Amino acid sequence: MMTIGRCGFRLLLACSFWCAFDGSFRAAVHAETRTAAALTPEAVWAAIDAAQDGDTVQLPAGTAVWSKGWNSGRGAKMKAITIQGAGIDKTIIGDDRAQPDAAPFFLLGVEGKPFRITGITLDGTGYRNAGNWGGLMTIRGTCKNFRIDHCKFKNCDHMLE
């Protein structure tokens, strides 16, 4: 009976993992963090646009009031990324939109592209129609695997749509 030495077993195990993942493991190894230059819809869009599947888009701490969302007028489909604020009540985005289709976070999910939104406070304070036209975060599309966690929604009629 033939036996495989400890070194040979490790090599065999590594090769089998490589074949099982079909090389997709490389994407996770090379994931990057893209930091938005400011807490504006344009800066957030620029970071998301530059991101690749597996990346994290980091939003800075601070408070900003948006009159439109980062995806307003673009209809961009979500990538398999994480959009991460500095934490609840640390990254605060106020909603001051004049149009119903301009939700601060309009997420058009795509099947097979799981996304995550975390560490953000969405606030309707001072906005006379906060959430009346739709949620502060709108999720549509075919993605069946997304995660919204450690987010705070306050002072509006509709949080999620």
Image (cartoon, rainbow, N blue to C red):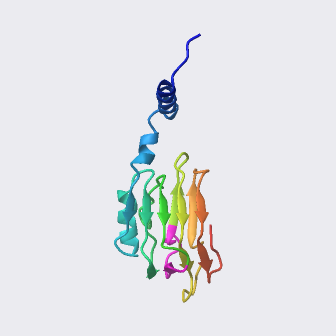
> What residue is rendered at 53% in x and 56% in y?
115
Magenta part of the chain:
89-105
State the image coordinates of residue 81 (x, y, percent, origin top left): 47, 56
Q: Quadrant of the N terminus?
A: top right
Give the x, y percent position of residue 70. 43, 68
Q: Is residue 42 left or right of residue 119?
A: left
Name the quadrant containing residue 122: bottom right
Report the residue at 64% width, 75% height from top: 158
Relative to 54, residue 47 above or below: below
- Up/down of 146 relative to 6, above or below: below
At horizontal 48% and vertical 63% (from top left) the residue drawn is 83
Q: Nearer the viewer, residue 148 or 86?
A: 86
Q: Is residue 78 magenta?
A: no
> Where is residue 155, by image quadrant?
bottom right
Quadrant of the drawing holding the C terminus: bottom right
Q: Which residue is at the far top?
A: 1
Report if residue 101 is visible in the image. yes
- Residue 125: x, y in percent? 56, 87
Q: Which residue occupies the extreme bottom position in the image?
A: 126
Question: x, y (%) of residue 129?
Answer: 58, 83
Q: Which one is nearer the viewer's eye here, 98 or 3?
A: 3
- For the point 49% across and 30% down, which residue is it? 10
- The majority secondary structure of the magenta stretch comes to loop
Residue reaching furthest to the right: 157
Tag count: 0
- Magenta-drawn stretch contains 98: yes
Q: Is residue 132 visible?
A: no
